[in-house]
Image (cartoon, rainbow, N blue to C red):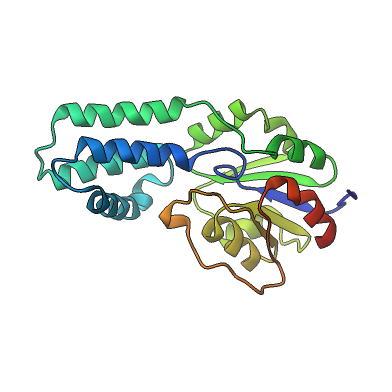
Amino acid sequence: MKQFEGWTIGFDADDTLWHNERFFQLTQARFADLLRDHADADHLSDRLLAAERRNLGHYGYGIKGFVLSMIETAIEVTEERVPASVISELIAAGQEMLAHPIELLPGVEETIVSLKGSAGLILVTKGDLLDQERKLAQSGLGDHFDRVEIVSEKTAPTYARIFQGRDRAVMVGNSLRSDIIPAIEAGAHGIHIPHDLTWEMEKADAPSGHPRFHRIETMTALPELLDKIA
């Protein structure tokens, strides 16, 4: 693999470097079980997603906002009769999520290590500051990045600032909506690595046919693709 002098490579964190969405889905299944006498799972899922959409501007992304949205939804579907024991279990579920060990996705560590020093590496993630810092520290990957950017939202202006307007920049991630499309709009290449589990609010249509849109199936394919792009 050649050196990418002057290039910047951005990496998403959750479900690109390590597992994340699986824990939200497991907790949501637990939530549905707790409220099974009040609403079926599909209806409850729709109500929860609506609450999450409403609350993004208040709580941002991450586990804390997710827990508050579950509590709000539980109050709504039970017409304010939700038992305190259920609220307590939802809080405990959130605390368990915040303490869950980090599990890297296959090929991530060796790929990041192989790229270190060949280009500027930046971690670009959104969500709760403390939780994202915790996950990065536990991942063991922190020392491999030249910069870490924890942002409230991933937009084209966000990527333009991070990449400083360079056209020799790529963003690697699992979310078309947050990682790929806005990065391409900012002038960077977007490299999509799909994950089996994707939050509904991160889904979008792929910009197929765009010259700066690329897709690979695993992180280990990244170095070869970078060779072609550069």
Q: On the rendered image, what quadrant is the C terminus found in?
A: bottom right
Q: In the image, is 23 to the left or to the right of 135? A: left
- Relative vertical location of residue 99 with respect to residue 121 in this rendering, above or below: above
Q: Quadrant of residue 91?
A: top left
The residue located at (43%, 36%) in the rendering is 23
The residue located at (80%, 42%) in the rendering is 115
Q: In the image, is 169 to the left or to the right of 162? A: right
Observer-nearest residue: 92 or 195?
A: 195
Residue 230 shows in the view = no
At which x and y percent is residue 206? 57, 67
The residue located at (15%, 28%) in the rendering is 84
Among all residues in the image, which is located at the extreme bottom? 209
Q: How many marks?
A: 0
At which x and y percent is residue 87? 22, 31
The residue located at (86%, 52%) in the rendering is 4
Q: In the image, is 230 to the left or to the right of 65? A: right
Q: Quadrant of residue 133?
A: top right
Among all residues in the image, which is located at the extreme right? 2
At which x and y percent is residue 196? 52, 49
Observer-nearest residue: 211 or 152?
A: 211
- Relative vertical location of residue 46 with respect to residue 125 in this rendering, above or below: below
